[in-house]
Image (spheres, rainbow, N blue to C red):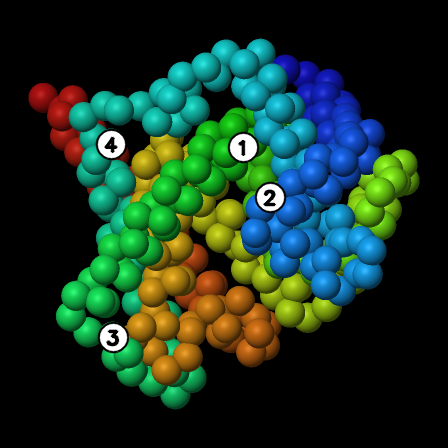
Amino acid sequence: MNKGRGVSIFLVNVAGIILVTILLAPFAMPMIEFLLPLIPGLPKLLGTQHYPGGYNFSPVWRFVNQIVIMVFLLVSTWRMGLRSLSSLGLPFNSGWMGLLWRGFLWGLIGYMIIVGAALVVGARQFELKLAGLPLLGKLFHMLVVGTVAGIWKEIIFRGMIFQVIQRCIGTTGSALVTSVVFGTYLLPVDVKVPVRFGAIDWGVGVRGLQEHLRVLAYPGESLLAFLMVFFLMGLVLNYAFVWTGNLFFPIGLHSVWNFCDKSDRFFLNRELRWWLFGQEGIGPALFGWTALILFLCYVGVRYRYRSQRLDDARVSP
């Protein structure tokens, strides 16, 4: 595909996603108000206690936006011929299980390096808070949840978004853009778009967009650290997808990071995420994730070099 045409197609799709989200957002309001008394946790999610006679529409706006993005992705992947698990990066050939376990292993080792650094510098202390069957049960639950989330997000971001953007602007451009999308998607953005019950606010789509752009334009130190960290994570996962040619290794990395992020609180006096995601300053977060990235890049280069040597050995007389 011509690069200029690819960039134009990419920008048209982005504009289409924004426009459709703006148009559909007001029509979600009657459905949300119908569901509020039926779903116990929904009023708390939408903060109805903080807005007399109304609620915060921001989570609804994000949900509508995610649905629109998924529809655009499904249409794009279908048109590109990405209609099977294999085409999305999940070819179940003879080596897929080894790549998956290798991703788990090296992701865990990398995370343990950061834990070790936190213990050495005194940022954290070892403290076993559960033992026996309760601990094993919690860890198993978090492993399952982390793996499911890792599979789902890797199919979406690397299997679909990366490949769709790659066809438009190439591998390098896709790696950068997908990492930015990955980072902004996972940001804990605290956006408030108050609306009132009983009437459709036709401008709520535009207001939702304005508020999200405002927060992203002035993120503050904590959100900036989150964005930088998730951007770096996205680059590593994109790199792992490119050099392995499938999703199994990045699924292993992503799943074990999810697992470690939720489970280290049972072994440390304070959760490591507060150190790694910038709540204790950008410096420690960048130190931790840069160390992890350098380690994983080393693993990737060594793995690729070793695979190439094995391939050369097979074809040599």
Determine whether the residue tagged by mark 4 lies in a helix, strand or loop: helix
Q: Is disc 2 surrounded by few (<14), some (14 to 19) or many (20+) residues within 10 Å?
A: few
Residue at x-position 85% and y-position 50%:
196
Residue at x-position 28% and y-position 61%:
138
Residue type pointed to by label 3: Leu
Instruction: Quickly name the residue at label 3.
Output: 130
Determine if residue 134 is in view.
Answer: yes
Residue type pointed to by label 2: Leu
> Which label's residue is closer to the chain start, 1 or 2?
2
Rendering coords of residue 257 (x, y %):
38, 56
Rendering coords of residue 16 (x, y %):
77, 26
Up-down: is 33 above or below 212? above
Q: How far, Cα to Cα, is label 4 from label 3?
A: 34 Å
Instruction: Quickly name the residue at label 1.
Output: 162
Q: How far, Cα to Cα, is label 1 from label 2?
A: 38 Å
> Which label's residue is closer to the chain start, 2 or 3?
2
Asked if residue 163 lies left or right of residue 110, the reply is: right
Q: How far, Cα to Cα, is label 3 from label 1?
A: 40 Å
Residue type pointed to by label 1: Phe
Q: Which of the two residues, 310 or 268, is positioned nearer the viewer here?
A: 268
Question: Are dots 2 and 3 in contact, CB under 8 Å?
Answer: no
Residue at x-position 72% and y-position 68%:
220
> Which label's residue is closer to the chain start, 4 or 2?
2
Q: Is disc 1 surrounded by few (<14), some (14 to 19) or many (20+) residues within 10 Å?
A: many
Of badges 2 and 3, nearer the viewer stands 2
Instruction: Quickly name the residue at label 4.
Output: 96
Instruction: Quickly name the residue at label 2.
Output: 38
Of badges 4 and 2, nearer the viewer stands 2
Question: Are dots 3 and 1 in contact, CB under 8 Å?
Answer: no
Q: Which of the two residues, 2 or 230, is positioned nearer the viewer here?
A: 230
